[in-house]
Amino acid sequence: MKYKIQKSPFIVPTTDGKLIEEHFGLASILSELSIARMVAPPNWSEPYQIPEFDEYTYIIKGKKQFDIEGKIIVLKTGESIKITKGTKIRYSNPFEEPVEYLSVCFPAFSPDKVNRKA
């Protein structure tokens, strides 16, 4: 088949209130990259990580904070960023509104390649 329409993304189980709908990737339709729509609630954050994949983020609605090796960057609706593999990064939403965004990882996101730090 020359194309694949994704009508039922895989909902990744989380314990932090974050919604992850993986459209393509290792948890849904096997792919060399992953594409996921995410919604992070207010006051959400993840531990630092040093992933073994490039990650592209596009903000659909709201704001998201990036701590990139100690430098704080805030993206707003309509903005995007690429974080290169091997970069120490911490994602968060310290704001009062949820943030909705798309995340694309290449190669595909894998829990054993994200290298989260406490």
Image (cartoon, helix red, strand yellow):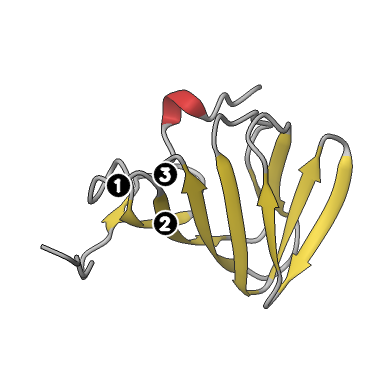
Say which of marks 2 and 3 sits in front.
2
The numbered disc on residue 14 is 3
Give the side of residue 86 with respect to residue 4, left or right. right
Please state which amino acid type lies under the numbered disc 1: Ser
Say which of marks 1 and 2 sits in front.
1
Residue lying at the far left of the rendered structure? 1
Q: Quadrant of the N terminus?
A: bottom left
38 or 104, which lies in front?
Answer: 104
Q: Is residue 43 visible?
A: no
Give the side of residue 49 with respect to residue 28, left or right. right
Provide the secondary structure element on which disc 3 rests: loop
Q: Quadrant of residue 21?
A: bottom left
Provide the secondary structure element on which disc 1 rests: loop
Please state which amino acid type lies under the numbered disc 2: Ile
Relative vertical location of residue 22 with respect to residue 114 in this rendering, above or below: below
Q: Residue at x 67, y 41 (%)?
A: 84
Q: Residue at x 64, y 22 (%)?
A: 117
From the image, tell me which residue sits under label 2. 35
Give the side of residue 48 with respect to residue 108, left or right. right
Q: Is residue 10 visible?
A: yes
108 or 100, which lies in front?
Answer: 108
Provide the secondary structure element on which disc 2 rests: strand
Residue lying at the far front of the rendered structure? 2
Q: Residue at x 59, y 26 (%)?
A: 116
Residue 34, percent across and down?
40, 50
Q: Quadrant of the C terminus?
A: top right
